[in-house]
Each structure stands twice: as structure tokens, then as C-alpha cells.
Image: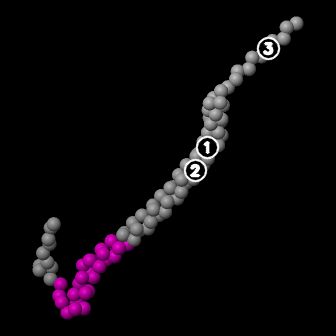
Amino acid sequence: MRTKRVKRIKLLKGEKMMAFLVIFFGFVVMPISWVYTKALLSETNIELEKIESKIDSQNDNNEALSMQIDELASIENIQSIASESGLSYNNSNIKTIDE
């Protein structure tokens, strides 16, 4: 009976280093970079939500101020302020300016 000899392939130093780097990169560097990227993405999404919240708040504030302007510019308000100041409201003296 003959026994087969298994011939081992010897790797050079450079090849061993390359294999080590590939394994190291695949099992250490890639997962760390993936987690780091996900953390940055999460942080960016949180900042985006904060900015959107500020925008919504400012839009609500702008809408409230616009309503207040409409109330102050109403004919009834103008007439009441004019009468308090001793003035009379005369519609024929009002001129409209178009921009």
C-alpha cells in the first residue's frame, strides 16, 4: 500500500503578510468602520430632526404673527383707533398703492 504524500505549498513572507492584512481588514477594520459610519448617520439624523423641529416652530410663529398683522390691519381696528384719536374714517380719502 502506498501512502500519498501531501505536498504543502509554502507561502512567502509577502504572501503571509498580504493574507494577514486581508483577514485583519475583513474582520477588524470593516466592522469598526461600519459601526462608525452608522453612528455618524444617526447623529446626522438627530441634528436633522432638531432643525426640522425649529423650522416647524418658526413656521408656527410666522403664522401667528401673520394673523396678528391681519387683526391689526382690519378695518374695525383702524376705525376704533381713529375714533380714539378724534379722527374720522373717510373711505373716499383712502388711496390704494399697487407695487
How are the colours assigned in the image? one colour
Question: What are the residue bounds of the magenta stretch?
Answer: 64-89
Check if residue 66 falls in the magenta segment: yes
Q: CA distance from mark 2 to mark 1?
A: 10 Å
Q: Amino acid at mark 2?
A: Tyr
Residue under the image location 44 percent in, 67 percent down: 57
Residue under the image location 36 percent in, 69 percent down: 62
Q: Which residue is mark 1?
A: 29
Q: Amino acid at mark 1?
A: Val
Q: CA distance from mark 3 to mark 2?
A: 49 Å
**Which mark's residue is nearer the viewer, 2 or 1?**
1
Residue extending farthest to the right is 1
Residue under the image location 25 percent in, 87 percent down: 81
**Where in the figure is residue 67, as x and y percent of width and height?**
34, 73
Labels 2 and 1: the sequence-earlier one: 1
**Where in the figure is residue 60, as x and y percent of width and height?**
41, 68
Q: Is residue 77 visible in the rendered structure shown here?
A: yes
Callout 1: helix, strand or loop? helix
Q: Which residue is mark 2?
A: 36
**Front in this rendered view, residue 1 or 46:** 1
Q: Is residue 19 visible in the rendered structure shown here?
A: no
**Where in the figure is residue 42, as x and y percent of width and height?**
55, 54
Callout 2: helix, strand or loop? helix
Numbered circles on residues, count: 3
**Where in the figure is residue 40, as x and y percent of width and height?**
54, 53
Residue extending farthest to the top is 1
Q: Which residue is mark 3?
A: 5
**Front in this rendered view, residue 15 or 82:** 15
Callout 3: helix, strand or loop? loop
Check if residue 14 falls in the magenta segment: no
